[in-house]
């Protein structure tokens, strides 16, 4: 059953296999059709892999979406979109056609075995913070009580994140 309250959620999409731009654009269309209205989107960013080095660079994009789905419904829907686009889960942090992470769901804090929001590692990853800062610089992290811009400035990650042309 859907929660009829409209909530803004921030998602990070990434791809490092296949036609990355096309896969990400298809994911955004499916999110628009199945999750809710895409309010904002960052530009694409080319990013170094994180966690497992011997793989191609990623293309990442952050989007803001309004949805009536509750957080667990959102997780199910984003995982189904990943499967629709050909995602096969083989290796944690390994190469993939598509990855859709829920970074924030409004200001909610959720800590369940299958779902943790805000994303527990987002503040340590430039590839999340840089695109997110483009669309939500003043959003306040509900646990750290710092803006995305502040978290970006404090992040020790040295992984390269550059605009993709």
Image (tube, helix red, strand yellow):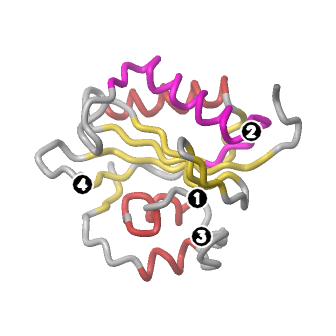
What is the C-alpha distance between the residues marked 4 and 1?
A: 19 Å
Q: Which labelled disc corresponds to residue 137?
A: 3
Q: What residue appears at the point 45 percent right and 47 percent down from the top-left corner?
A: 61
**Distance from label 2 to label 4 (Cα)?**
30 Å
Residue 11 in the image: above or below residue 69 = below
In the rendering, at what x and y percent does residue 37 appear? 72, 36
For label 2, the SS is loop
Residue shown at the point (39%, 76%) measured from the top left: 155
Q: Residue furthest right?
A: 4
Residue 118 or 160: which is nearer the viewer? 118
Q: Secondary structure at mark 4?
A: loop
Q: Residue 5, how many percent across, how many down?
A: 87, 42
Q: Is residue 83 left or right of residue 52?
A: right
Residue 87 on the magenta span: yes
Provide the secondary structure element on which disc 1 rests. Answer: loop
Q: Is residue 141 magenta?
A: no
Residue 39 x/y as whole percent: 69, 45
Say which residue label 1 marks: 118
- The mark that comes first in sequence, 2 or 4, is 4
Residue density around tag 1, few if under 14, some if 14–19, many if 20 or more, within 10 Å: many
Q: Which callout, 1 or 3, points at the residue further toward the start of the chain?
A: 1
**Which callout, 4 or 3, points at the residue further toward the start of the chain?**
4
State the residue position of label 4. Answer: 51
**Circle on res. 70:** 2
Rounded to the nearest angstrom, the CA distance separating label 2 from label 3 is: 24 Å
Query: Which residue is painted at 59% across and 36% down in the image?
Result: 75
């Amino acid at each position: 059953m859907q929660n009829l309250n409209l909530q803004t959620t921030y998602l990070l999409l990434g791809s490092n296999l296949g036609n990355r731009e096309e896969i990400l654009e298809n994911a955004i269309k499916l999110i628009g059709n199945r999750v809710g209205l895409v309010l904002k989107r960052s530009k694409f960013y080319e990013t170094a892999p994180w966690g497992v080095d011997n793989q191609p660079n990623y293309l990442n994009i952050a989007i803001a979406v309004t949805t009536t789905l509750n957080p667990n419904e959102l997780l199910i829907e984003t995982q189904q979109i990943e499967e629709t686009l050909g995602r096969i889960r083989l290796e944690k942090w390994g190469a993939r056609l598509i990855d859709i992470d829920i970074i924030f769901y409004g200001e909610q804090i959720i800590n369940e075995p299958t779902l943790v929001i805000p994303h527990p590692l987002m503040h340590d990853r430039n590839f999340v913070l840089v695109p997110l800062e483009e669309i939500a610089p003043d959003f306040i992290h509900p646990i750290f009580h710092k803006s995305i811009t502040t978290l970006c400035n404090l992040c020790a990650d040295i992984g390269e994140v550059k605009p993709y042309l």
